[in-house]
Image (spheres, rainbow, N blue to C red):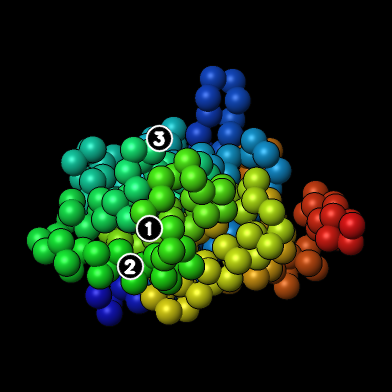
Amino acid sequence: MPETVNQPYIEFREVSKAFGENAVLDHVSFNVMPAETVCILGRSGVGKSVSLQLLMGFLKADSGRVIVAGEDITGFSEEQLEAIRKKVTMVFQNGALFDSLTVGENVAFALRETRELSEEQIYQIVDGLLQMVGVKEMRDLLPSDLSTGMKRSVAIARALAARPECILYDEPTTMVDPLMAQLLGDLIKRLKLQLSLTSIVVTHDMRLAQKLADRVVFLHEGKAIFFGTSAEMEKSTEPIVQEFLDLDELKLGC
């Protein structure tokens, strides 16, 4: 769709969401261009994961507009959202793999659901995807046999099997060791470059954000108090942003 190249693929327009008295998002606006990676940063409980659930249609905004794949999904029915979810997929924190299926069968699941392929074609694609994310030798293992980081890699392979235009990553490096965090970051970056994927990465890991982000959204007390490049963020005069950066520098220096 060449005519939409200069239009955002994803956009929050003054989006608000509250749970009872707790205003998690308060008139938040940002956008993601096609093939761009935007990281959503902030402390725990500031609405980072809620933002992804709004984009997937799992939650509805109280006000504002949510644009996904160039379409205003704010009032979409579940049937209309299913069509959007074929273009946009999410890698959950826990991987959300099927416990009773092997790694290979987990990745094959989307292929069997969406396209008419022979078993031989399916397994060629599965092997290719598992190799791409570095876990091909684990094809016949069950999720219970894998570390948290390996489960995330398999979840990414399963997401790619659906041939999405956009992937949403929810805290991909949480609860994994530093080496695995680095490998996952490298993988997400490589996929973006190789496949021109549009991506949103929710994280509190500044090192990951610096590696991946074309632009950063910083959420604090329901507001997007910063939206721009990592370099611009480092020059931000917002005290909370600077405090976050300073704390991260301390952690990196440990």
Judged from the image, the secondary structure of the residue bearing numbered disc 2 is: helix
Using the image as rendered, state which of residue 163 and residue 88 is in the foreground.
163
Judged from the image, the secondary structure of the residue bearing numbered disc 1 is: loop
Q: Residue at x 89, y 61 (%)?
A: 253
Q: Compute the Cα span from label 1 to label 3.
A: 34 Å
Residue 30 located left or right of residue 195: right
Quarter in which the N terminus is drawn: bottom left
Q: Are marks 1 and 2 in contact (CB under 8 Å)?
A: yes
Q: Which amino acid does the dot numbered 3 rest on?
A: Leu
Which mark, residue 139? 1
Assess disc 1: are there few (<14), some (14-19) or many (≥20) residues with their C-alpha within 10 Å of its C-alpha.
some
Give the mark nearer the N terminus: 1 vs 2: 2
Q: Residue 245 at what x, y percent from top left?
A: 81, 58
- Which residue in the structure is indicated by mark 2? 127
Q: Residue at x 40, y 35 (%)?
A: 59
**Residue 70 in view here:** no
